[in-house]
Each structure stands twice: as C-alpha cells, then as structure tokens.
Amino acid sequence: MTTIPHWINGTAVSGPDTQPVYNPATGTEQARVVLGAASEVDAAVQAAAAAFETWQDSSLSQRTQVMFAFRQLLVEHEEELGRIISAEHGKTVDDARGEITRGREVVEYVCGLGDVLKGSFSDQVSRGIDVHNFRQPLGVVAGITPFNFPAMVPLWMHPVAIATGNTFILKPSERDPSAANFIAQLYQKAGLPDGVFNVVHGGKPAVDALLTHPGIEAVSFVGSTPIAKYVHETATAHGKHVQALGGAKNHAVVLPDADLEFAANHITAGAYGSAGERCMAVSVAVAVGDAADRLVEILTRKANEVKVGPGDQPGTDMGPLVTKAAQERVENAVGVAATQGATVVVDGRGLKIEGHEEGFFTGPSLLDHVTAEMDAYKEELFGPVLAIVRAESLDQAIDLINANPYGNGTALFTSSGEAARRFQRHIKVGMIGINVPVPVPMSYYSFGGWKDSLIGDHPIHGPEGIRFYTRPKVVTTRWPQPKQQVSAGFDFPTSS
C-alpha cells in the first residue's frame, strides 16, 4: 500500500507513525499518510530557515520566473491533480479542477510581483530630506489547511508567501494529503530551491509544534471557528503573526421580484456542490414574502435532480462526504431537524450507490420551516443540507443574518438595484453576492469574513496577503553637501 511521506528540503521523508487515507466513494483504505510531530516540524523549520538566507535575497525577476513556470505546470497537470483530489476528498473531478483554477489565479496575481510590491517615495519632506518605504519578507511561515480544498486554500497562501521572499511549511489535512506533495514536486520542477516549500503531515501534535516553534514567524489557518480561535490565541501568545479563518453559515436571500428559476438553480448548486463541504456553501435560503412557496417547489425539484455518485464518473453532480463520521453527522442532523419541527421536504439519508454501497454517500436534503432556534440553523453542518427560513421582508432577512454569529458570505437574489444597495450596505458579512450565490473574490481582492468567520484582522490572499507576509520599512534620508554645516537640535525633530 502507498505511504504518503513528508516533503522536507526537496526530498520525501518517511516516518514510523501512519494513519489511513480512505477513498470516500468506496469506503476502503487506499493509502497511509505519515504523521509528524515536533521533530519533523523542527527539521522542516531548519530546512526553511537555511533556504531563507538565500531566497530572501533573490531578485523579483527570479521569483517571478519561478511563479510563471509553476503556473504553467498547474495548467499542464490540472487533470492529474484533479483526479488525485477527487480520489481522496470525494468531490467530482470537474469540481476539483475548478478549485485548482481558483488557486492558480493567486499564482497569476503574484506573477505581477514587481507591481504589487512597489513602495513609495516622498521628495523634500523637509529641507534636504526624502522619505521612502518598502516591504521585506518575515522569514519562515506556515500554513495549516483544511480537507475541503486540498489545492485551492494552500494556493491562497504559499504562492503569496514565497513570491514575497518567505519560505513556507504546509501542514495539510491528513484526510487528503496527496495534493500537497504533488504541488511540492511541481514547485521543484518550476525551479524553486529546495527548502523554500516543505510539507509536514500530521494531526494536533504537528499543529501545536508549528504554533509554538520559535523559528516560525507567521501562521495562516483555515478551518472551524473553535480551532481558528485556538490557533490565533496559541500562535499570538508565541509572538507570531496570525491569519485565522473560521466557519460559516451562509445565507442566500430571495426576494419576490427575483427570477425564481434562476435563483433556485444557483442556490441548488451552491448548497450541494462538493456535497456542501465548502466554507462558502449556501446552507440557508431565506425566502421573503410571496417568494417562499414557489421557491420551495422549485428547490425541491432541483434537489431531486442532483445526480449523486463517485466523483470520477462523468455526469456526477455531487460525490460522497469525506469520511464515514461526516456522513453519520450530517444524516443525524437531518433527523434532529425533523424532531425540532422542520419539514423534511427532500430526505437524502440512507442513499446507496450501486457498486459503491460502502461509500460515504448521502443525498441532498431540503428542510423547510426552519427557525433560528433549531440546530440545523445554528450549526455549521458542512454537508448537503439546505435549510429554508421564511421572512416577511428584506429588513427582517437582514436582521436575521446580522444576528448570526458567522459573517463569511451571503447572497441576495433580486431585480431591484435599490434592494441590492440597501442589502450590501447594511449586512454584516464580509463577502456579498448580488445574484451570485458563492461570492468568492478574485485573487486581486482579499478573501475573509466578519464576526466568528475571521479571528483577528487578517484576510487571505490579494493585497491583504501581501501585507500579511511582509513588514514595512520606512527610510528617512539626508545627503548633506560636503562640509555643509547642519545644525542638530535637542528638541524632537520637525519638518521645515
């Protein structure tokens, strides 16, 4: 059986402790991944620190050339990487290719490094004195990433960190670890020096070692809110820069003036794509006024049309959940919703796929008459469950969303510009879509929510990513003429 190793200083590194990696479509063990802890993290830090000594002094041109080559390799190997992701995560190959594309956009963004890293210059701020600024890398930085996007979320981190002159240690999810090693090999082919990008697999011991190691300057994290809070508290207590993105409960509001077929079609895709295992998944549809009954009718039809099957089969819309435990948790949540008074309009529990009876499949579930007091509304289910909450007005829908502890993404379906403008100004959510169900920003904007969806104040990629992985220097300069006498005062210096 294949064993998935660490990748440290440009070579595969094995270890004695391993755990299974499953194929979610069959429910069978397909590989084992090595589990690292403090010693493996320290080895990666030592390699990354040594590489930083030369990489920080590499030219902007050299770093850009590596990123251009890396970007091309991502294009050439998109299908292969997509199948690797599908086999371990369960999502469809096309969905996996989509996440690779969205990750590659960040690489394309940093290919313009010379522009995004430009400093500024102020001439003659005082008599004979100029001021300019520039940004420099932090050093060794780390990323701790979730299972649901084994390529995209890391690609939102390490290209920005590496392009700005840092060296990087990635701790991917142990549930689908192979994509990280594949990316490491692409970097090597692109000409990235050994030690600049490293991969350490493992669970909590590896995470804790990264959060506390004195040789690591910054940590990026995406995952659940409780773990995001733990990462932020622990790493900042050890003097590190931290960006920590947490969970979500994303609402899509549908007004009576919306094109209901259009809205339902996009909400269905946003709710059940990738089996709902997305931090930007639409998990709540807020049906306003007269839109409710008709919207439920259309959503019911579309949920029943979703084709569930193995992710590598053509025509599949939705694959299995990532683990047996996830399958059981999601199906239990549907049962709890029914006991709490929700109407189970479409019940995806107990789905069996012929030839894949042991796979971790569950079908789309649609719940109507959900209230804010029910567990199905309050909890991040992270599965193919769409809850419908009914509201009397747009203002009531806004109040509902603003009262939710999460503020990651939201959407409004309407044909009214006035309603759209009111919604986007008054909603307390970081990423908003107007007739767009999954409003993930482009790479030249930054990704991040509000409230419990972002712990601390550092969003990811885009301009905020550049700022996170660098720190500024401001230089005040005087070049006096030879033998020129410039008086020095004991008072605090001012401009003149």
Image (cartoon, grey):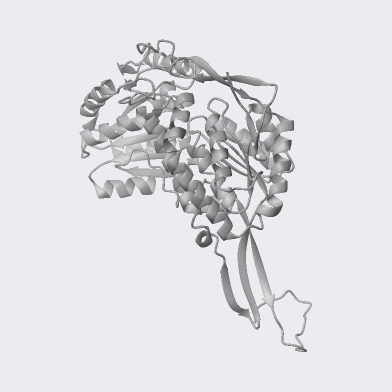
Quarter of the image with the C terminus is bottom right
> Is 325 or 60 nearer to us in this picture?
60
Q: Is residue 281 visible?
A: no
Q: Point out residue 169 in the picture as x, y percentages from the top left corner.
A: 63, 40
Would residue 443 appear left or right of 289 to someone viewing this image? Answer: right
Would residue 418 appear left or right of 448 to someone viewing this image? Answer: left
When the figure is inspected, residue 192 is found, relative to residue 60, above or below; the finding is above
Q: Point out residue 371 in the picture as x, y percentages from the top left corner.
A: 37, 24
- Quadrant assignment, res 171: top right
- Quadrant assignment, res 180: top right
Residue at image point 57% right, 55% down: 63
When the figure is inspected, residue 451 is found, relative to residue 358, above or below; the finding is below
Residue at image point 34% right, 38% down: 437
Quarter of the image with the N terminus is top right
Q: Is residue 59 visible?
A: yes
> Is 245 or 98 nearer to us in this picture?
98
